[in-house]
Image (cartoon, helix red, strand yellow):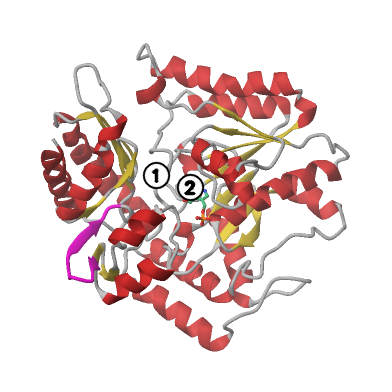
Amino acid sequence: MSQLVQYDAEHCFHPFSNYHDLNNKGARMIERAEGIYVYDENGHEMLDAMSGLWCTNLGYSCEPLVEAATEQLKKLPYYNLFFQTTHPPAAKLSKLLAEITPEGLNHVFFTGSGSECNDTVIRMVRYYWSTLGKEDKRTIISRKNAYHGSTIAGASLGGMSAMHKQTAGVVPDIVHIDQPYGFGECEDGDLQAFGLERARQLEAKILELGEDKVAAFIAEPIQGAGGVIIPPESYWPEIQRICDKYEILLVIDEVICGFGRTGEWFASETYNIRPDLLCMAKGITSGYLPLGGVMVRDNVADVLISANSEFAHGFTYSGHPAACAVAIANINEMQSRNIIAELKETIAPYFAEKWQELSEHPLVGEARVKGMVAAIELVSDKTTNTRYKKELEVGMKCRDNCIKSGLIMRAVGDTMIVSPPLIITKKEIDLLIERAKKALDTTL
Ligand code: PLP
């Protein structure tokens, strides 16, 4: 253990980490990065197929983002948006976001993170319904295995049972329905019928609770941290129909999917979803500085405006000026370099083709991909898609072998997931697949 790793082991509690392991083995020290590669303190190079935490969409060497932050820090390093105050980066960014997000989403509430977005969602949808005189419309329906953040409200909205158990008590009036996880839960192989069945659980839940009690349904277009759960095509149209029919606000958490990951600016376009609220973070600044935002549809915004009272909610770093400046530079870069069109036409189809090669591997039961987000399912028997025994921790083994072969992939149980930077080239995709195959071979 180097001295720095020792300091870290002795003094730093990390997110989502086992403190016993941290204390004994120390953490992996990432020292620098370049392009889509990160380097540990021993100079070991790793292709970062997770884009950090689904965020470094433009890679690690995007000079205009660094310049934007530097310039803004020199000019106005901090101010806030509280009490009818604003600053130029927030004003410019809110206009830009209204232009690039799906039609009708014309207002933004800035936050500092994805979790803060989802906390904001809970408060905002309840404020919306109470302004309309419907105080009882409070319950929010979410999905099992969803991830909406790590604050107490984010964890409650999310459907991660381990998080619920550890916290021993979560925010009330939040309920969960099943996820549309085809590989793990569709028994007869009819994915479209399965998608409909899972979507109709929303209708059943609304009828069970009473539509006058349900405020909103929240979901990620593709469940990310839950294991890249790509829904069947039948799923989203049915969800949209149900939300429209029962006047339930539809909240789409695009913290991962937003800013190009599925081949459009937002996955709501990819799946033809009409969100009332849309959450974003991560890719909004390519992760260079922390920022989040909740986009609000006009009809919802009109009600909040008509309330003509103070919405008592906000964060010190809501719309931090340097973060907003980076977000503007990030959007400008994506536009001027035509990143999304290039991705849709060339890079994403190539990635999909190469990713499918992994399905040939004896360890892989399924390889699935949508845009620039993908997963493989590790199985002990490919003919029956049998899972490994849990105690073998095959996913963790595979993750460690990826690191040895110079690749960062994430393990969600025995599901291996990636979300590569959007600037990845075809040659780098070849390298990613080569290293993944090598890691799979050594995991056998
Ligand atoms: N929502 C989704 C879909 C996420 O994937 C995440 C984080 O991974 C969050 C919310 C929480 O974001 P943050 O970690 O910035 O609070």
- Amino acid type, callout 1: Thr
Disc marking residue 266: 2
* Residue 138 in view of the camera: yes
Tell me the magenta residue range: 39-49
- Amino acid type, callout 2: Phe
Q: Residue 377: horizontal and vertical position, in percent?
A: 28, 32
Crowdedness near tag 1: few (<14), some (14–19) or many (≥20) residues, C-alpha within 10 Å: many
Residue 113 against residue 83 in the figure, above or below: above
Residue 127 in the magenta stretch? The answer is no
Secondary structure under tag 1 reads: loop
Residue visible at 48% across and 47% down?
Answer: 266
Secondary structure under tag 2 reads: loop
Q: Residue 165: horizontal and vertical position, in percent?
A: 55, 39
Q: Residue 395: horizontal and vertical position, in percent?
A: 27, 39
Do the numbered discs 1 and 2 sit on residues whose CB atoms are within 8 Å?
yes
* Residue most extreme to the bottom: 74
Crowdedness near tag 2: few (<14), some (14–19) or many (≥20) residues, C-alpha within 10 Å: many
How far is disc 1 from disc 2 in space, using C-alphas? 7 Å
Residue visible at 65% across and 77% down?
Answer: 87
What residue did someone put label 1 on? 262
Specify the quadrant that holds the N terminus: bottom left
Relative to residue 88, is residue 228 drawn left or right?
A: left
Relative to residue 377, is residue 231 drawn left or right?
A: right
Instruction: Pick the residue in front: 334 or 179.
Output: 179
Disc marking residue 18: none
Relative to residue 264, is residue 171 drawn left or right?
A: right
Q: Residue 291: horizontal and vertical position, in percent?
A: 54, 64
